[in-house]
Amino acid sequence: MNFSVGLSTYLLVGAMLFCLGLYGLFAKKNVVAILMSIELMLNAVNLNFVAFNRFLATDRLIGNVAALFVIVLAAAEVAVGLALVIAIYRSRQTTNVDEFNWLKW
Amino acid sequence: MSTIVFFIFAILAVAAAWGVVTSKNIVHSALFLALTFVGVAALYVMLNAEFIAAVQILVYTGAVSIMVVFAVMLTLRGDVGESSPENKKWGWGLFVAGLVFVMITAVILTNADWRILEGPWTIQNSTAALSNLLLTNYMIPFEAAAILLTVALVGAVILAKGVRENK
């Protein structure tokens, strides 16, 4: 058997992580679980950036820079998202997204 | 040898991601999430991106996972074993996610340009080269990211703590 790891193998791993995150985004009721699914999808995208950088641009680090900025944005996003979750929980005593059906209270 | 290491960490990452989205206990989901981040960091090391791997461990496994655990602990009510249920339309979610996966897989497997193996890596010290890039070509985005992080931190504190009116 002659099988070695190439670019498409890394892309397939990224696709699996992305689609698991997409499923969690659609299927979960708890808003913290939805934020976790978003983190999974961002990780899949980062893996694609770094893999493309390694295989298709071997003399530049442009994909690594993009991955670094995605990590920064993900950190900011999760901080604000979790603060919002805690603020909503304090007034409504729930984390179930099915009950987040109002704009004002 | 590197093929075996790749498959160990790829399977670890994907299996832990499966655990994140299928576990009914949200604390288990958070711990599986940390495991996924570690698996992806190992894949970064195999892709000659040591700095990104270190940042991944520090920021994701160290900070984001812990912050998620904090949020879980602060918002937990009732039975922890049923804290992260599926909603009624989860079948549709599975259908759409499966469809997207089939589409992406078809694109990856039919694109001949991507059926390549690792070539030689020409950058000797990728961390030094990355810092050089960030402080020259990507200086403005770098500063903007710093401002974004500061604003997000202040916003998160205000949202979570609330603003006290002075008089």
Image (cartoon, coloured by chain):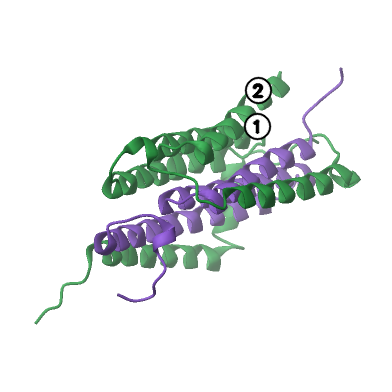
Chain colours: A purple, B green
Viewer-closest of B53 and B17: B17
Q: In the figure, B21 relative to A72: above or below?
A: above
Disc 1 marks a residue whose amino acid type is: Met
> In which image quadrant can residue B9 be found?
top right
Q: Say whether disc 1 or disc 2 marks the residue closer to the N-terminus.
A: 2
Residue B66, can we see it? yes
Circle 1 residue = B46
Q: How far is disc 1 from disc 2 in space, using C-alphas?
A: 9 Å
Q: Residue furthest left?
A: B167
On screen, residue B77 versus residue B119, left or right, reads left
Q: Residue furthest front?
A: B88
Disc 2 marks a residue whose amino acid type is: Val
Mark 1 lies on a secondary structure that is helix
Mark 2 lies on a secondary structure that is helix
Circle 2 residue = B5
Image quarter (top left, top right, bottom left or bottom right) of the C terminus of chain A: bottom left
Chain of residue at mark 2: B
Q: Tell me what residue is drawn at x 49 percent, y 32 percent.
A: B35
Q: Do the residues marked 1 and 2 share a common chain?
A: yes
Residue A39 location, x and y as percent? 51, 49
Q: Tell me what residue is drawn at x 50 percent, y 59 percent.
A: A73
